[in-house]
């Protein structure tokens, strides 16, 4: 396996285009793959926009299992890539170990926190965005029963779910049916199981289902559409996956985090430390476009925008599950 991984990395290095002299940006994706239509793909989109805007190429790599993390990251750092962006909390251990060995390299972890001077830790307030789409879900629901399908059962995903419950119940939902896909990383890329969970929730009366499950969510949205119900996408704008059947998407601007990391390094403005991004900072939001404009009434949009404004103003405090592993709603 070690020889295989090194071979892949060597191939990536040989085929990478020439970089600008002052920056050699890179992304190493989390499990689930670059084109998961969700979290990893949002990171890819940010890198692509940076390349389009600046003409600077970037290097990227998709790991196949957790054992490759440290080896891949060290290889990229040894090759002079800078900055190196890693979407996913599971990168924390590898970064903790490797960042001190490369003090001049900028590392960025998205969804995790590493306290090193050359590491930027980007944390999103997913609970805030999830509260807002919960408001929309409850107002769109005819049964007043809505669903939530999470990916891997971890506090981060329960943070999404708990915020969603808060918004849905505030807007009149009587029940939120809540299921996780699994307790291993495979839960991020199992659309078949996601679809099965969504069908079970529909059988229990849910008519709007929010998926916070990476690639698994594609199956959730498909099952909701096939069942004549509404889905809610996550991370990227997924409204296009089932046009007219996705109520909205809770956008988590991973693309912006990647773009900013590349641009700040290029402009010599990179800073390490914790970077918190919520509604106020434009880090999370709900998606509106031609695919869902007929699903969101003016009254629904007004309620969602009021919830946003009240959260930003501090009038509504959305509970953060990760602070106490509790959901009080």
Image (cartoon, grey):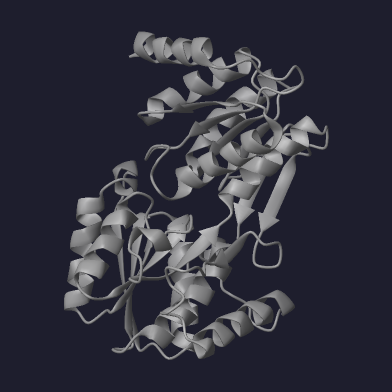
Foreground pick, 39 / 181: 39
Q: Could one spot residue 329 in this view of the protein?
A: no
Name the residue nearer the viewer: 110 or 247. 247
Q: Is residue 21 depicted above or below 178 in this figure?
A: above
- Residue 258, quarter of picture: top right
Quadrant of res 55: top right
Q: Is residue 285 left or right of residue 15?
A: right
Task: Kindly identify the residue that appears in the image at 28 percent across and 79 percent down.
Answer: 207
Tell me, yes or no, if residue 183 can be seen here: yes
User: Which image quadrant: the N terminus?
Assistant: top left
Q: Is residue 256 left or right of residue 250?
A: right
Tell whether 200 sits left or right of 177.
left
Answer with the quarter of the image where residue 2 lies: top left
Using residue 304 as the reference point, say whether residue 32 is left or right of it: left
Judge whether 264 appears above or below 231 on screen.
above
Asked if 66 appears above or below 221 in the picture, the reply is: above
Q: How many marks?
A: 0
Where in the figure is residue 255, as x and y percent of width and height? 58, 47
Determine the residue positioned at 35% across, 54% down: 151
Comparing 20 with 184, the one in front is 20
Q: Position of residue 250 (x, y in %)?
A: 49, 65
Residue 77's place in the image compared with 287, above or below, is: above
Q: Residue furthest right?
A: 268
Residue at 38% x, 44% y: name it.
36
Q: Position of residue 21 (x, y in %)?
A: 75, 16
> Percent x, y for residue 240?
40, 60
Residue at image coords 47%, 43%: 40
């Amino acid at each position: 396996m070690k020889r295989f991984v090194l071979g892949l990395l060597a191939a990536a290095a040989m085929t990478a285009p020439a970089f600008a002299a002052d920056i050699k940006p890179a992304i190493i994706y989390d499990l689930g793959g670059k084109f998961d239509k969700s979290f990893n793909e949002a990171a890819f989109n940010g890198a692509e926009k940076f390349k389009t805007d600046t003409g600077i190429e970037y290097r990227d790599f998709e790991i196949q299992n957790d054992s490759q993390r440290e080896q891949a990251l060290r290889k990229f750092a040894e090759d002079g890539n800078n900055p190196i962006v890693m979407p996913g909390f599971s990168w924390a251990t590898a970064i903790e170990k490797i960042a001190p060995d490369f003090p001049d390299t900028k590392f960025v972890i998205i969804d995790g926190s590493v306290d090193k001077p050359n590491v930027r830790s980007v944390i999103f307030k997913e609970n805030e965005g999830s509260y807002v789409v919960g408001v929309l879900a409850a107002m769109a629901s005819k049964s007043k029963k809505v669903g939530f399908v999470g990916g891997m059962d971890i506090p981060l995903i329960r943070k999404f779910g708990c915020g969603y419950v808060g918004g849905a119940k505030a807007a009149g939902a009587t029940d939120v049916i809540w299921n996780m896909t699994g307790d291993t990383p495979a839960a991020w890329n199992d659309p078949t199981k996601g679809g099965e969970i969504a069908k079970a929730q529909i059988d229990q009366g849910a008519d709007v289902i929010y998926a916070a499950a990476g690639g698994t969510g594609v199956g959730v949205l498909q099952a909701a559409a096939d069942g004549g119900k509404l889905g809610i996408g996550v991370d990227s704008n997924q409204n296009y996956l089932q046009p007219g059947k996705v109520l909205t998407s809770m956008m988590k601007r991973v693309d912006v985090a990647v773009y900013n990391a590349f641009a700040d390094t290029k402009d010599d403005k990179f800073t390490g430390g914790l970077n918190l991004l919520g509604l106020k900072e434009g880090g999370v939001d709900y998606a509106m476009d031609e695919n869902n404009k007929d699903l969101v009434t003016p009254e629904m949009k007004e309620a969602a925008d009021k919830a946003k404004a009240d959260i930003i103003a501090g009038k509504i405090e959305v509970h953060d599950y990760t602070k106490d592993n509790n959901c009080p709603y």
